[in-house]
Amino acid sequence: MTQGRVRVVLGMLGMDQHEVGARVVAGLLRDGGMEVVYLGKFNTPQRFATVADEEDADVIGISVHSWEYLELVPELMKLLAERHSRVPVVVGGSVITPEDEQTLAGLGVAAVFGAGATPEAIVEKVRALGASS
Amino acid sequence: MKPFYTREDAGGRDDSKPGEFPYTRGIRAKRGSWIQRGLSGEGDAKHSNAQLKALLAKGQTGIDVIGDSPTMGLLDPDAPLARAAVGSQGVSLSCLEDYRELLDGLPLESMTISSSVPAPFFIAGLALVAKERGVPLDALRGSVLQPPFYAEDCGYAMHLPFALRMRLACDSIEYCSRQLPRFHGYLEDTYFFSEVGLTPAEEMALGFLQIRHISKELVRRGVEIDRFAPRIAILVNCSMSLFHEVAKIRAARRIFATMMRDEFGARDPRSHSVVITCHTSGLSLTAQQPVNNVVRGALQAMALVMAGVQALEISAFDEGYRTPGPEAHLVGLRTQQILELETDVAQVIDPMGGSWFIERLTDEMEEEIRSLVARFESRGTPEQLCDRGVFAAFFAEAMDRRHRALSSGELKQVGVNVHRLPPEEDRLLRGEAEAKGRPWHSAIERSLERKRARDPEVVQRGLDAVAAAARDRDRNLMPALVAAMADGLTVGEITQALRRGYGLAEERS
């Protein structure tokens, strides 16, 4: 973290258009005192990696409501590794099953939130990850 | 709402019977069934064709097809942004060959075929396949939805400017009114944007805002109101506020009838009586305890049958995860069949009519819808409201409002903010709900192969013709679009040519 406030680049991957969750989380993080760079819909893994770099992000947050993340999150992780970026990636969405959670953790995703996640847990975890990055 | 209602609460100014103007109680005086269907489409066209045939074999009485995200967003399967989404959340339809495979062996003459796939392309695909099979175009029935105002903000983003979205909508409606006279070329879909959490009145207000604007535009073009108004239908949402939803549908029929007769001068009774179809709310369903969604769907469907809808789809128990899987499809269909064949809810038309409460609620709903329409119209033209982000802000506010209500507990959702279960106990139907598919990379390969197999000169000529048609703002785009599809051009390519005709960059993302 560079200047006191955790900065989160938050958005959605691919053609996933269910934006409700992403907007809600953006509000939660903002209310939790973090700075949110909101990318909205229609982002490639490339774009996430580039913006995170340009914006000096402390955390990348991805909201998912389609299955595209199973293909696109691994791509993002690979891109970040190639750039030697250590920015933690957080993925959340009700479509994530416990099995997917294991898969994502195996890829090096720092935190995963499924349907039952509470707002407090999300805010706390993202803040902690951001503060130590 | 009051604790109870009395005779004095009911207005009593509308004594019409079902089948009589203003059609508050229903558009027909005769009892009848409704079209029973489920939202379909998954993988490639062949796979979806098999899915449709399986549903028809189980007693489904109509077809409703949704495209995967690339199809809905006018991208070919091989577009960079599309790759991971091909074949999930809907079917991949990018060229005429896909339509041939999708509709293969389906009874085009005797069944309604509805679709959420971008209208001009679905109409072109359907019409071309019908011609090839010798089915007269005036035998085709079904519907396509037209979302020019709200598409970009609410899940059907096509990345096209307002003027082109409006033109595609009006051109395709006009084309249908002449070429496919029994087909509903204009389904006003209030479902998809109300899923942000709009109230029933807000949902209908935005719907009527668009119906009025599109109707005015068609009349301005010289299309007679009685030529297209009989083929306007409305696809509404149904939340868990069941009585409000019934009142909304009754009020919508009344508003439509009065608007068409008094404002547009429509004379044909079919122009006054609007077909209403419904898709039950996905937003009301939960990823937690998916079996509870079966109950929610059944309650909503019952209310809708009593409201007298012409077609019905129940959002499935796996809604929190995907478009319906086979088990979820079957439960939704069986729910409808039980409602029709085992209960008595469909035996009398408008069974709630005359209830002091429902009549009062219908009047209040009508008034609220009308005043909301007036408020939006006073704030600018639809183009201004779109481009200044007025609708986007309205939707964002609704999302926040709903989130606040859920967080505070003011709005209760069983399994979400009340009566939760620990994950180890939340097992029923979980395996079925969570089953995932992979992207259909084979569809990407096939799309590329088909593109390579074409004569580049034919392709270039087709693209130039579409761009030229787009540049001439007075021409109907449909003939050029149909010709391009017939020549094997893809939806993505045709869209790029349309963009070129409007001086827009061809590449995006």
Image: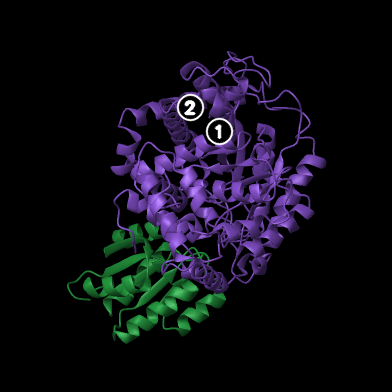
Chain colours: A green, B purple
* Label 2 CA crowd tier, 10 Å (few <14, some 14–19, many 20+): some
Residue with the most extreme left position: A3
Residue drawn at x 29%, y 68% is A8
- Considering only vertical position in the picture, is B214 above or below B124? above
Specify which label sits upstream in the sequence, 1 or 2.
1
Q: Which residue is mark 2?
A: B223
Q: Quadrant of residue A78?
A: bottom left
A54 or B125: nearer the viewer: B125
B27 or B214: nearer the viewer: B214
B262 or A126: nearer the viewer: B262
Q: Which residue is mark 1?
A: B177
Residue A88 on image: x %, y %: 34, 78
B360 or B118: nearer the viewer: B118
Mark 1 and mark 2: Cα distance apart in space: 9 Å
Q: Secondary structure at mark 2?
A: loop
Kindly identify which chain the residue marked by label 2 belongs to.
B
- Considering only vertical position in the picture, is B436 above or below B374? below
Q: For the residue marked with disc 2, what is the amino acid?
A: Val
Residue A89 on image: x %, y %: 37, 76
Residue B172 on image: x %, y %: 50, 40
Q: Is residue B339 visible?
A: yes
> Is A7 on the left-hand or right-hand side of B344?
left
Q: Are marks 1 and 2 in contact (CB under 8 Å)?
A: yes
Residue B407 on image: x %, y %: 44, 53
